[in-house]
Amino acid sequence: MVDAEVQVPYRVVQWATGNVGKVAVRHFAGNPVFDLVAVLVFDAGKVGKDAGEIAGTEPVGVLATDDVDAVLALRADCVMYSPIWADVDAICRILRSGKNVVSTSGPFFRTDFTRADFDRIEAACQEGNSSYHGGGIHPGFAGDLLPLTMARLASRIDKLHIYEYVNFGTDPSKYIELMGMGADPEQFLAGPTLLGESHPYFTQSITEVVEGLGKTIEKVTRDVEIAVTTRDIGYEGPPDSDMPGATGVIKAGTVGAQHHQWTAWVDGTPLVVCHAVYTMGDEAVEPNWNCGHTRYRIVIEGDPPTELVLQGAANPDGSHTHPGYIWTAMDVVNTIPAVCDAEPGIVTDFDLGLVRPRGIVGGPS
């Protein structure tokens, strides 16, 4: 007997094969709910390679291409869109071709900053009879769906805190210096920073939470504090990164940790505070904020006081890895059936309701 959920696979396209896109390729290849029909790449060195080779798995029989027109001409139900930065023109073009889109690159939720983009996306959806959903880990799950789900257990919420902790000491990244680690403290605080300029992304999560609680944001304020390194810290980027071998040294006395806060004010008081805390390691910075593992933490001040932590568990061999790329990819991959089955237009988390993932029990690892 054939499982009803896999009788007619969803024909999917993977758009970009960075760390998130590779996760999606591996999942599509191993889940009978999906039929991977094309993989679009932007690195000439990947063109013509089997998508499985790019994703680090067995061949899947789909060769990567950089021919956008050819991909758009294919019959497909959905495009999993995962470049680092969103190109709204490209997203609209995909939607107008009649293909649904799920995006880990955003935009994620309608705010003053994203309003024009969402207007264009909505128009493209109507023209192509297609649907669009933006998601990921944060924004997309940890900073919006998770606190809203927790809110269902509360009798009263006075303030809600959303924490994203990233520990580069245990989870190295190719973005360490781009994030401002190793910068002169005074120059860091005086100038624009990558995290500081990312407030439009985090504000999308905050707005979703506030609107989900039936309120409207009056204003959003920003604050930042830093900790400095107490010694030189050498680092090397992860071997499976798209930019392997990224190495360097964060000198003593430079920026070794940063804490950015975005506070949404409602009815004259702070209601939702989003914290982005990035560190080179607890024992190597002063002051020591005791950040611990890379993880997400939601704290509700109210009745009852409630706290929840989302982090990767130990592997069978006892090692610890942060599954952030998998979380980011799967949050939207698991919405594909619902987005494909939705009415044309933008599909928010509120529209999706409870997502029922398909094909993951006993599925690909």
Image (cartoon, rainbow, N blue to C red):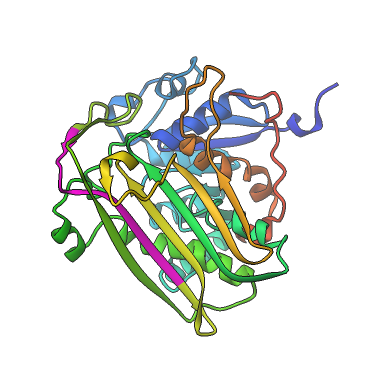
Image: magenta residue range: 248-263
Task: Tell whether position 105 is magenta.
Answer: no
Q: Residue at x 37, y 36 (%)?
A: 67
Position of 175 with respect to 77 (left or right) is left
Instruction: Give the position of the N terminus as an image quadrant.
Output: top right
Name the residue at 40% across, 23% down: 54
Determine which quarter of the picture holds residue 150: bottom right
63 or 278: nearer the viewer: 278
- In this view of the protein, can residue 33 be seen by the observer? yes
Q: Nearer the viewer, residue 123 or 228?
A: 228
Q: Position of residue 363 (x, y in %)?
A: 66, 25
Can residue 344 be seen at all in this image of the molecule?
no
Q: 54 above or below 126?
A: above
Judged by its main secondary structure, the magenta piece is strand
Q: Is residue 260 one of those drawn in magenta?
A: yes
Q: Quadrant of residue 173?
A: top left
Residue 195, horizontal then vertical, whole percent:
32, 56
Q: Is residue 2 above or below residue 295?
A: above
Lateral position of residue 346 relative to residue 342, left or right: left
On the image, the x and y values in percent for residue 166 come to 39, 44
Locate residue 158, reporting x and y percent: 60, 72
Tell me if residue 312 comes above or below residue 308 in the rendering: above
Q: Quadrant of residue 106?
A: bottom left
Q: Nearer the viewer, residue 213 or 256?
A: 256
- Looking at this rendering, what residue extends furthest in the top direction? 58
Tell which residue pokes out farthest to the right in this image: 1
